[in-house]
Image (cartoon, rainbow, N blue to C red):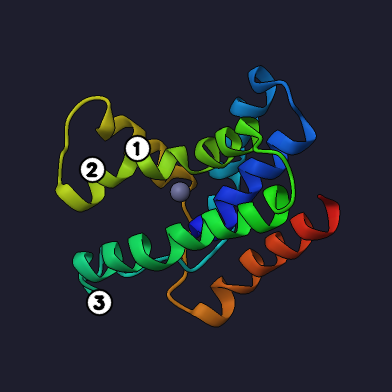
């Protein structure tokens, strides 16, 4: 899924479960489970060369990633005291993608990135159809907003 779904999910888990020993593994596990849902993301089409990696990277860096920070701020930190646990949850919710970026965008293929990429691919189900692949991610955000 997009960072706008993964980041707030990790933050949500951290907000509900303040113990990082429990929330960190759950945030990482949630990432893989969310990727299992057929979704549209910025990497979509990379393997089919329908979108350049540079464009996907710019889209991720300038839109998706900053939006995930903004959403976590608005949902969990606006008018609140700074809570490092929330941001740790955000980070861990995105960690599997952070780990994959060097592999995906810079072609750094070495241990353990290769194995982590295989795990990611095992769970990853994406669709090039934005009208099918975006609604589940919007639903995640609505659920987080309602349950936070
Ligand atoms: Zn992922």
Q: What residue is at 42 percent from the left and 68 percent from the top?
A: 63
Q: Nearer the viewer, residue 136 or 55?
A: 55
Q: Which is closer to the viewer, label 2 or label 3?
A: 2
Task: Mark 3: give few (<14), some (14-19) or many (20+) Cα within 10 Å.
Answer: few
Q: What residue is at 15 percent from the left and 39 percent from the top?
A: 108
Label 1 and label 2: CA atoms lie apart by: 7 Å
Label 2 and label 3: CA atoms lie apart by: 20 Å
Q: What residue is at 16 percent from the left and 37 percent from the top?
A: 109
Q: Is residue 43 visible?
A: no
Q: Nearer the viewer, residue 51 or 71?
A: 71
Q: What residue is at 62 percent from the left and 53 percent from the top?
A: 73
Q: Is residue 91 above or below residue 56?
A: above
Q: Is residue 89 visible?
A: yes
The furthest residue to the right: 147
Whichever of labels 2 and 3 marks the residue nearer the N terminus, that label is 3
Question: Quick one: SS at disc 1?
Answer: helix
Task: Mark 2: give few (<14), some (14-19) or many (20+) Cα within 10 Å.
Answer: few
- Disc 2 target residue: 102
Q: Is residue 101 left or right of residue 78?
A: left
Give residue 131's quadrant in the image.
Answer: bottom right
Question: Quick one: SS at disc 2?
Answer: helix
- Disc 3 target residue: 50
Residue 111 percent coordinates (x, y)? 22, 25
Q: Is residue 15 left or right of residue 55?
A: right
Residue 74 percent coordinates (x, y)? 67, 58
- Disc 1 target residue: 99
Whichever of labels 1 and 3 marks the residue nearer the N terminus, that label is 3
Task: Mark 1: give few (<14), some (14-19) or many (20+) Cα within 10 Å.
Answer: some
Question: Quick one: SS at disc 3?
Answer: loop
């Amino acid at each position: 899924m997009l960072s706008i779904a993964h980041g707030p999910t990790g933050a949500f888990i951290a907000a509900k479960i303040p113990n990082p020993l429990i929330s960190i593994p759950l945030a990482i596990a949630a990432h893989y489970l969310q990727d299992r849902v057929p979704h549209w993301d910025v990497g979509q089409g990379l393997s089919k060369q329908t979108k350049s990696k540079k464009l996907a990277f710019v889209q991720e860096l300038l839109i998706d990633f900053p939006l995930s920070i903004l959403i976590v701020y608005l949902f969990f930190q606006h008018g609140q005291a700074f809570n490092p646990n929330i941001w740790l949850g955000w980070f861990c919710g995105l960690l599997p993608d952070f780990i994959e970026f060097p592999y995906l965008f810079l072609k750094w293929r070495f241990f353990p990135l290769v194995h982590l990429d295989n795990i990611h691919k095992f769970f990853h189900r994406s669709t090039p159809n934005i009208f099918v692949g975006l609604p589940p991610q919007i639903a995640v955000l609505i659920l987080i907003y309602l349950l936070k």
